[in-house]
Image (cartoon, helix red, strand yellow):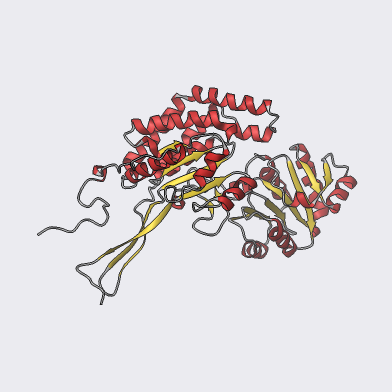
Amino acid sequence: MSSSPDPDSPSGDRPLTAFPSPSLPSPLPQSPVLLAAYRAKAAAAELAPLPRTPKDDALLAIADALVVRTREIIEANAEDVERARAAGTGEAVIDRLTLNRERVAAIAEDVRRVAGLPDPVGEVVRGSTLPNGLDLRQLRVPLGVVGIIYEARPNVTVDAAALCLKSGNAVLLRGSSSAYASNRKLVEVVRDAVGGAGLPADCVQLVPGEGHDAVRELMRARGMVDVLIPRGGASLIRTVVEQSTVPVIETGTGNCHVYVDAEADLAMAVEILVNAKASRPSVCNAAETLLVHRDIADAFLPLALEALAEAGVTVHGDERVRRTAEESGSKAVVVPVTTEDWEAEYLSYDIAAGVVDSLDAAVAHIRLWSSGHTEAIVTGSQAAARRFTRLVDAAAIAVNASTRFTDGGQFGFGAEIGISTQKLHARGPMGLPELTSTKYVVTGDGHIRG
């Protein structure tokens, strides 16, 4: 009498690694982008059923290779930085682009952290025995082939590769042309390590070509690419969302607000504000707008303006903020705020600032201008904190904490693939579980439906 296959094992009673690699179609597509997508699809099918250990071994091999080959990576990155400076690129963008020994070591450490995280694949999301005796379970499974289109930060290349590999996905990486030499070298290092660990190197690929045609082709590779994730500025995200025929998980820009309530601790509020704005202004979780309750404005604004001036931040202030700066003799650079300032993601040492009449007025302002990323309140009132968290619609709400904490690493997710500001499938920092879908396994004993 033959035994039933184990529903936990996609390969029945065979070892998971015994799966034959799927063959590529014949004839092969002529387009380099489509050929890369076909290879990724084959690699994804080979990767999906693997248990945790071979994936973790490959991740640790990637981390070691990044450290060993740091010099190569920095030399390649120097080409991009030199080209960016020659083109007159702003310092905030150059900072996002630049890799040094410490940053490469940090990227490698992020990969090790991902290796140490639980594998989401195979997790039972829910399960039960139905009244008719059927066993029903919903399991996490990889998405398949994930395309990432992103801008100048080359660390995203490794973060995305590590998270996709751990979650059983193949990844097609399309960074900006400004980081092409860096990304090409990083992908070379990753692929060498993955292949050396015995996994299909094609589970990590750089999308061929540097022009817009390659991006458009990737966005239209429906059926070969399972999902696209854009990561960058508003223009990039809007283009991918509007033009892609492949399903998109939308990551958003970060017009993040810090609201200082009437019952805020002044010293705490200043410290949070400066950290949120100036600790690293070129990232999406940096604060871009300060809102201050009118009842605390006279006491708080002089302190805030002094601290922002020391941090080198230019304040784009409303009339009350500008008047306070003038009357207090502040050294801060304060210029009139415009409509464009309220909606700006500066990514620089600039902040919009205004005084509001109430918490509800702050919420109304945030509803009008927020990008849905992270909004913060500083208050000593539990009632105010509860009302703010109920009324504000964003992926993350910070209460008496900096907006800078909205990050996969800070949340304990390991590296992140982006901050999703949409409401379908994933919202907030996208870690490993957000790179999976689910499938139902229904197990019976000869059950038929009447």
* Res. 273 visible in picture: yes
> Is 344 left, or right, of 116 in this rendering?
right
Please report the residue visible at 88 percent of the width from the left and 42 percent of the height from the top. Answer: 329
Residue with the most extreme bottom position? 450
Please report the residue visible at 53 percent of the width from the left and 36 percent of the height from the top. Answer: 155
**Camera-side residue of 94 and 45:** 45
Please report the residue visible at 63 percent of the width from the left and 33 percent of the height from the top. Answer: 95
Residue with the most extreme right position? 327
**Camera-side residue of 404 and 237:** 237
- Residue 371 drawn above or below residue 315: below
| Circle count | 0
**Camera-side residue of 411 and 122:** 122
> Is 448 left, or right, of 141 in this rendering?
left
Q: Residue 187: percent from the left, percent from the top?
A: 46, 32
- Residue 312 drawn above or below residue 264: above
Occupied quadrant, residue 308: top right
Q: Residue 384: percent from the left, percent from the top?
A: 68, 63
Q: Residue 86: percent from the left, percent from the top?
A: 68, 25
Occupied quadrant, residue 422: bottom right
**Camera-side residue of 249 and 416:** 249
Please report the residue visible at 65 percent of the width from the left and 39 percent of the height from the top. Answer: 282
Q: Which part of the image, by quadrant, shows the C terminus?
A: bottom left
Q: Which part of the image, by quadrant, shows the N terminus?
A: bottom left
Q: Residue 19: percent from the left, percent from the top?
A: 26, 44
* Res. 409 visible in picture: no
